[in-house]
Amino acid sequence: MAAAAPSAPSPATPLRILLAGDANGRLNQLFKRVASVNQSTGPFHVLFCVGQFFSSDAGDGEGNGDVADYLEGRAAVPIPTYFTGDYGPAAPRLLSKAAAGARGFSPGGIQICNNLFWLRGSARFTLHGLSIVYLSGKKGPGGPGCYSQDDVDALRALAEEPGIVDLFLTNEWPAGVTNGADTSNVPSQILDPHGYDLVVAELVAEIKPRYHIAGSKGVFYAREPYINDSAAHFTRFIGLANVGNKEKQKFIHAISPTPASIMSSAEIHARPPNTTLSPYISPAKSVPVEEAPKRPAENADLQYWRYDIKKQRHGEAGGNRLCFKFTASGSCPRGNECRYRHDEEARGHYNRNVCFDFLNKGKCEKGPECKYAHSLSDEGAVRDIKPHSERRRVESSCWFCLSSQDVESHLVISIGEGYYCALPKGPLVPNHVLVIPVEHCSSTLAMPVEAEAELGRYKDALGTYFEKQGKTAVYFEWVSQHSHHANLQVVPIPLLKAASVKKIFHLAAQRLGFEFSVVNPDGDAKHGRELLRSQYDRKSSLFYVELPEGSVLLHLVDSNEKFPAQFGREVLAGLLSMADRADWRICKISKEEEIQMVDDFKQGFHEFDPAE
């Protein structure tokens, strides 16, 4: 009889974790060992498996028979188990049902059966206080078992978010992990230059986890801890052997880390005596020649441009950021007073279809939504990219693009670097505001990390401004697969109504036949947006609302669900007893009245405006 899964640890007790390497479908052998270890030295609370989880046999081999026992309920998984990495050729058939049943975000894993969770793609999630990041799959041509560029880009964005990552799980070992380490007594497989991954090396250098766990090389290796560049904490790398290997290499390992979020500064700074320098200070030099990507000589310096951009951001290289208005249109209304760079060369690249984010930061985080080039070479800028004149057809008629001929600039209140504020057409109430990305982007959740920080400053400023009026703000955004240009709605309501907002949104949801999920039960609004951003897959349709107390309510909208586009406005119109103003089209006012409303808002908001 399988042992019952252990209960969650108390806040004062660190999570006890088991780590395992490539299972190769030998789940009976793996879970038998886990149950034995759990009985003798447990209880353990969770098992993380890295490497190839399913058998390499594409048919119904012995390993896949093991898997079927668990998926079909004939055998029990002893403790909560999360697997990541290369899934094996039989994975599409074995995981198809779970994949089809998965809805929207699943950063904490898609449940395959009781106690078994599939970590798909890449994401960051929290488990009993531990911050966990994963890259699921191996490098390859794509398809099942291979990570995508979108997965990598998502982790690059996460790397710039605040907070220390406790565990980073990957399938493959990072290139250069042995640099600076004592290799006098390591197995020969570790010194073999094959089977390492440059991308994983770059990611771990940026993410800086406290533990990096990997499989795939069939050998156990616990590297000496190493310090991280520009970080106080150190990192331990643990590579695990495959389950049931004939060499009797260690395939299961236990750790019990305290979450960094509750560690003292002294604990974070403490270093073991055998700590080394980071092996990834120069990741390009650590790549085996056989695996170094072949790039044209003229583009050789582009690979690490993002590191130069990071230096610019911190003032180390004397650089500054580009002005989008000037880059897109050739002119800027702020003229010499603009804080951002007016660069004719960048404008030339932009007109040749080069992505603005790539020009500005050296990278783009929009994933498949971005249709522009990410190269400064002429060939790279024109290959498979529609001309700007054709690409801009949608944007030229976009109400919210500042470079569009249809933008109603008299409604603009404030222009920042990544966002601007404007009054909407047909406002629900006076001082109803939109916070809008400057660049053409379908959701604020898909915006870069730097822009997210600016959004936070706008929210703080608006909150202070409304508070002086005896009001508080409700934020909501509707994101559909047909969304073009994002706009975050900000509606001020009287403080006396604040306590009723949550109740009325839940009631409205019930009437439409769905229930909201609470993204951040702790009520920390910043944390709520971090969770939304880390979970947003850029493909889902969703509606979320940030309540005055900071809680974020989320509804993932099914593709066949008829969700009202004006839902947020309709709910607040009911709360404010303004049902006749639920439709913005019947609330439109003259341009002269709009200009007066903007002037009035600017006068009161001026002292708080973060763009001033």
Image (tube, helix red, strand yellow):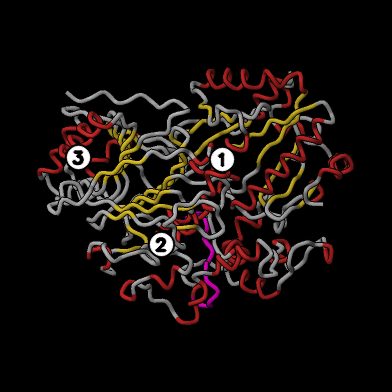
Q: Residues within 10 Å of mark 1 (few under 14, many from 20)?
A: few
Check contact, mark 1 vs mark 2: CB within 8 A.
no
| Mark nearer the N terminus (1 vs 3) | 3
Q: Is 374 contained in the magenta span?
A: yes
Label ID, residue 264: 1
Residue at the extreme front of the image, as rendered: 273
Would residue 501 appear left or right of 30 to someone viewing this image?
right
Distance, label 1 to label 3, CA atoms, is 36 Å
Vertical position of residue 367 compared to residue 101: above or below: below
Residue at label 2?
A: 199
Q: Can see residue 426?
A: no
Distance, label 3 to label 2, CA atoms, is 29 Å
- Dominant secondary structure of the residues highlighted in magenta in the image: loop
The magenta region covers 367-379
Residue 348 locus on image (x, y percent) = 65, 74
Residue 460 locus on image (x, y percent) = 73, 39
Q: Is 532 contained in the magenta span?
A: no
Label ID, residue 30: 3
Q: Residues within 10 Å of mark 2 (few under 14, many from 20)?
A: some
Q: Circle 2 — which element?
A: helix
Amino acid tagged 1: Ser
Amino acid tagged 2: Val
Pair 1/3: label in front: 1
Would residue 94 appear left or right of 127 to someone viewing this image?
left
Q: Can see residue 584?
A: yes
Residue at the extreme bottom of the image, as rendered: 297
Residue 120 locus on image (x, y percent) = 36, 45
- 521 or 516: which is nearer to us? 521
Amino acid tagged 3: Leu
Label ID, residue 283: none
Q: Circle 1 — which element?
A: loop
- 183 or 444: which is nearer to us? 183
